Structure formats: C-alpha cells, structure tokens
Image (tube, grey):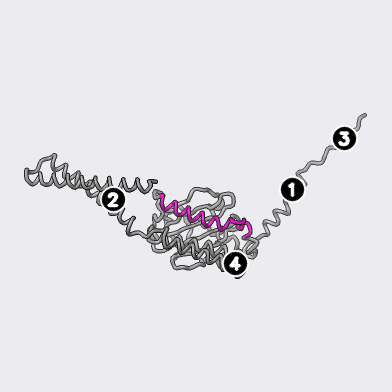
Amino acid sequence: MLNTTERRVVFVLFCLFTVGCAVFEGYLVRAVVENGFTGAKSLGVVLAGGVLVGCGSLFLRLVSKTFLRGSITSDRLHRSSSERFRIIEDARRSGQDEYQTRMQLVTNTLKFAEECLRGWVPGSHFEFCVFVDQQQPYLFAYFDSNHDVNARSMKDREQNPYWYVEKGYEVTKLLKAPTSHPRVLQDTSDAKLKYVFTSGQQRKQLRSSILLCLDVATPCALVISSNEKKAFPESDPEVLSFVKYIGSLVRYDLFEGDFIREVRACKPALFDETNASDLQAVRPSRQRSEVKAPEPKRRRT
C-alpha cells in the first residue's frame, strides 16, 4: 500500500498525463481540420481519444471512491465503539450473564459490518451469521438489513441440535473441514455448488455468500450473504480484508476468557450431550481392555 505522499505523487502524475493526452488530442484534431485527413493522424486521434476515455473513467472512479462513498472508519466506527462500551457498562451494572453480553457484543459487530457493506458491495439485503460448535452447529448471533436479530431457523434448531447438519447448510461443511481460507460462493443458484435452500424466500435472499472459519482448532464461522450475485469479488482485497477484520472482532468476543468452550454449559438445553457422555464412558473401558496383562513368569526346572 502507498503512503499519503506517494498517493499524492501518483495522483499529480496521473493528472499531468491526462492533461498531456488532452493537449495532444487537441493538436491532432486541429491538424486534421486544417490539413485534411491522413492515416497516421486519424490513427493518432483514435488512440489518444481511447486513452482519454480510459483516464476519464479512472478519474471518475477515484472521485467516487474518495468523495462520494461513505468512509467505513468514521461515524460508523465511532457509533459501534460507543455501543460496545455501553453494552459492557450495562452488563457490569446489571450483573447480566456472560452469554447474553457476548451475544450482544457480537451482534453489535455484525450491525457495524452491515452498515459498512450496504452501498459498498452489490446487494440491498444482507444477512450476517455467527455459528459455533462443530458437532452440533448453533447460530450464536444474527443480524440482517431489516435489523432482525433472530433468524427463522433458530426455532427449528432449538428443537433439534442437528438441524443445520441434517438440512445440509453450507456452513456445516466448513465446520466439518475447517480452513483459514475464505470460501466465496459467487452464485448460490449454480447447480455445481449444490447449495441447499430451505425455502423459496431464502433462495431470493441468499444469492451469494462468503464463509470464514474464525478458528481452525476450535471451529466457528462467520457467514455473510447478499441478495445479489457476485457481491464478494475475490479480486477485491479491500472487501476481503474488511470481512477478515470483522471476523477478528467476532473471534475476540468468542474466545476471550475461553468463552467459546462455555457455550454448551450456558445453554445445555440446546445441545445433546448423550453421545458425548457415552463416548467418555466407553473410552476408559477401551483403555483398560487395550492394556495387556503381564505374562506369568516361567518357573525354572
């Protein structure tokens, strides 16, 4: 990345180059008008005109990015930081349980992400999900462009700990085989992806998604979806860097104080501990059976 001085130098050089092309184009046009058309002059006019069009397009993009697009690090970041401080203070004063506080902090981060991505990447409706637990995935926090904090699938998951796994949600594949590389789905309707939709409404709202595993050792995931195709271009380093930044904020609130390992203890009714307890009961017996008894010593004759 260029520093401030280097960016100014590049911008000045770009302006000088554009002015030079414009002067050269004007000279060629005047020469053609006064002296008539020639092959070389006509070719020069076309080439210079093409360069001017390209420079003009690039200049408009720079102006739009610099002056027209809202900055993601100004008012939005200030509001998010203030809200985060308020959540922590209110929890301290009221004695709110740790689970509720962590969920509010993560939801506040998702709200900040929605405010930044809306108008930056394609789409008019975005959904943000944070999933925890590798074996029995649970939607820990949710936020969308309608400012809803509860997804329809949450009630189904409350009745069945394996609901997301049985429905074939894409995030369960990531949790089962975690990787640090973001998984980008440019078109969820592509038959090759075999993306599973649970309803027609979901098919309209989830046209493209990006999935990020927040920790490989203790798998949990951030999922961001848009109702437009190709909303998260892998060639745009700024978008990917911002998504990773949001993932880092979420990961901190989940792992600080090792909270991620206490989720089941906080919400035991949402998890099936039968298999885990059976496994723990079986392991000691297996270990005892695997220990060979010492062979009796042979008496000397």
Instruction: Give the residue pinned by disc 4.
Output: 92
Rendered image: mark on residue 58: 2
| Of the pair 184 and 160, the residue shown nearer to us | 184
Indicate the position of residue 254 as horizontal and vertical percent values: 57, 57
Mark 3–mark 4 Cα distance, whole angstroms, equals 67 Å
Q: Earlier in the sequence, mark 4 or mark 2?
A: 2
Instruction: Determine if the magenta segment contains residue 37.
Output: no
Marks 3, 4: nearer the viewer: 4
Marks 1, 2: nearer the viewer: 2
**What's the residue at 50%, 63% (across, down)?**
108
4 and 2 marks in contact (CB < 8 Å): no
Q: Residues within 10 Å of mark 2 (few under 14, many from 20)?
A: few
**What's the residue at 63%, 63% (across, down)?**
266
Q: Earlier in the sequence, mark 3 or mark 2?
A: 2
Mark 3–mark 2 Cα distance, whole angstroms, equals 89 Å
Instruction: Give the residue pinned by disc 1.
Output: 286
| Of the pair 18 and 49, the residue shown nearer to us | 18
Relative to 224, does residue 18 appear above or below in the rendering? above
Relative to 248, does residue 201 appear above or below in the rendering? below
Does 195 sit left or right of 122 as displayed? right
**What's the residue at 32%, 59% (across, down)?**
68
Amino acid type of the residue tagged 4 in the rendering: Arg
Q: Which residues are magenta?
A: 237-262
